[in-house]
Image: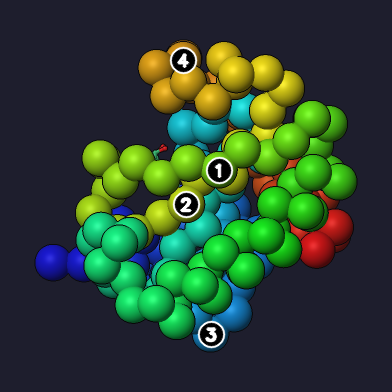
């Protein structure tokens, strides 16, 4: 059965898209730790990030860099933090999270709520900064 992220890649489930090319997709996390919290995935369905082949994994980091620099311009923050967990969705993904201090990237923190208009506007501003 396809992962929820493969369903997003196929357009079967909507997302707030940030960027896409032939191999990767970046979209807003639906339960964000911060405004602009973004997920970068390979379109190819691989569960564990360290099972992604070298070339695809290397490209995923370069794609993430481009997205992170756009997030940094769009959302006021000191840095864009990067994290990989993969405990919930079995489809490799990188979290890109705007942070100002250590506590901002604690996954035990309560998740933020945004309206669909707010999500769409955040995605629009980040995309405009790519
Ligand atoms: P992890 O697998 O890294 O532990 O967590 C998976 C992440 O994917 C979580 O931050 C969760 O909010 C996000 N997520 C789970 N399902 C969806 C979804 O359907 N759409 C989006 N945009 N994010 C999701």
Residues at circles 2 and 3 in contact by the CB criterion of under 8 Å: no
Q: Residue 130's x, y, as percent?
A: 80, 63
- Which circle's residue, 2 or 1, is located before the other in the chain? 1
Decide which of tag 1 and tag 4 comes sooner along the chain: 1
Camera-nearest label, 1 or 4: 1
- Residue furthest front as drawn: 54
Q: Residues at badges 2 and 1 in contact (C-beta under 8 Å)? A: yes
Q: Where is mark 4, residue-wise?
A: 109
Image height check: is 96 above or below 46? Answer: above
Q: Quadrant of the N terminus?
A: bottom left
Residue bearing the label numbered 2:
94
At x 45% / y 81%, what residue is drawn? Answer: 55
Residue closer to the observer: 12 or 1: 1
Q: Tell whether circle 2 marks a residue whose Cβ is less than 8 angstroms from ligand 1.
A: no
The numbered mark, 2 or 3, whose residue comes first in the sequence reads 3
Mark 4 crowdedness (10 Å alpha carbons): few <14, some 14-19, many ≥20: few
- SS class, disc 1: strand
Tags 3 and 1 touching, CB below 8 Å: no
Front-most of 102 and 26? 102
Q: Is residue 49 left or right of residue 77?
A: left
Q: Which mark is residue 82?
A: 1
- Residue shown at the point (68%, 40%) measured from the top left: 80
Q: Quadrant of residue 76?
A: top right
Q: CA distance from mark 1 to mark 4?
A: 16 Å
The image position of residue 50, as x and y in percent, is: 30, 62
Q: First in sequence, mark 3 or 1: give its number.
A: 3
Could you tell me if residue 37 is visible in this image? Answer: yes
Residue indicated by mark 3: 22
Q: Residues within 10 Å of mark 1 (few under 14, many from 20)?
A: some
Say whether marks 3 and 4 touch (CB < 8 Å): no
């Amino acid at each position: 059965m396809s992962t929820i992220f493969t369903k997003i890649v196929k357009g079967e489930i909507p997302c707030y898209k940030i960027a896409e090319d032939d191999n990767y997709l970046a979209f807003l996390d639906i339960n964000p730790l911060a405004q602009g919290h973004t997920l970068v995935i390979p379109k190819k369905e691989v569960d564990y990030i360290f099972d992604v082949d070298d070339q695809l994994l290397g490209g995923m980091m370069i794609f993430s860099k481009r997205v992170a620099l756009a997030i940094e311009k769009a959302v006021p923050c000191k840095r864009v933090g990067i994290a990989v967990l993969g405990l919930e969705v079995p489809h490799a993904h990188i979290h890109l999270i705007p942070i100002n201090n250590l506590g901002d990237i604690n996954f035990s923190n309560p998740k933020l709520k945004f309206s669909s208009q707010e999500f769409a506007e955040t995605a629009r501003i980040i995309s405009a900064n790519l």
